Image: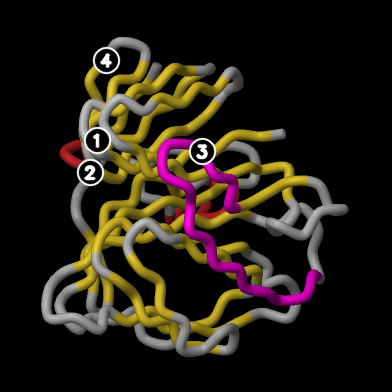
Amino acid sequence: MEILTKSDLREGGFAGLKEHQFVMDKKAFGPNRNPQAWDGLGNFVYLADARFMPKGETRMHGHKEVDVISVMVRGRINHEGSLEHGQMMNAKQAQVQRAGGEGFSHNEVNPDSEENQMIQLWVLPDRQGEKAGYKLYSPKIGELTRIYGGEIEQDQTFDSHTLISVANLETGHSVEQATASLVYVSDGEVEIDGARIEAGTLVRSHGFTLVALTCAQVIVIHES
């Protein structure tokens, strides 16, 4: 098991937010990657833990041929842009935007007078030229809820060989994964294979058993 924590990284940011970049895969960022950050897994190439300043925003910008996954930890975000403009994303929810060949533009805005926290992940698509799309999820309490990836025949999630799930856990809840995974603990404190792991920690494992020691949120990335 490998561990990367916020204290191992320098804080960066842009526009109205501060962030720690945990994953910047060389196949997406090349020589421009943060040398402290890890490579991802499969087509998963980016993970940042961001704090939006009060009334802060990313400012309108565009993406193409990348799938952008946002997981809300605390506070809320008002989503603006070419896909589902005006959608509000609340704490413990997640949104997924597929850019495809069509592309999309967006601005994520903190509407409140206090900081919030959001995790953003990027995955390169299995196929280029897809239609742009948007999905919003409210993961179930106490279990892993897949929000990204799966077979092309289903429509609950955007298809991909890279799978991303979110678990909003209460004390004592547990989840297991039998395959090589990246696990980001975005909130609370958990135990992974006997090790106590605090929020703001990325874990690379070949399979794990996780138990929530407090109310917690975790994001699990693996391949099908």
Which residue matches tag 3? 144
43 on left or right of 89: right
In primary-sequence order, the first of circles 4 and 3 is 3
Q: Are marks 3 and 2 in contact (CB under 8 Å)?
A: no
Dot 3, how many residues are within 10 Å of its Cα: few (below 14), some (14-19), or many (20+)?
A: many
Which residue matches tag 4? 195
Q: Quadrant of residue 75?
A: bottom left
Question: In x, y percent, where is residue 160?
Answer: 73, 49
Q: CA distance from mark 4 to mark 1?
A: 14 Å
Q: Nearer the viewer, mark 3 or mark 2?
A: 3
Asked if the stretch drawn in magenta spans residue 140, the answer is yes
Q: CA distance from mark 4 to mark 3?
A: 20 Å
Question: Which of the numbered marks, if any, corresponds to residue 115?
Answer: none
Question: In x, y percent, where is residue 197?
Answer: 25, 26
In primary-sequence order, the first of circles 3 and 2 is 2
Depth check, front residue: 30 or 161: 161
Q: Which residues are magenta?
A: 130-147
Which residue matches tag 2? 9
Dot 4, how many residues are within 10 Å of its Cα: few (below 14), some (14-19), or many (20+)?
A: few
Question: Which of the numbered marks, if any, corresponds to residue 5?
Answer: 1
Residue 198 drawn above or below residue 156: above
Name which residue type carries label 3: Leu
Dot 1, how many residues are within 10 Å of its Cα: few (below 14), some (14-19), or many (20+)?
A: some
Q: Are marks 2 and 1 in contact (CB under 8 Å)?
A: yes
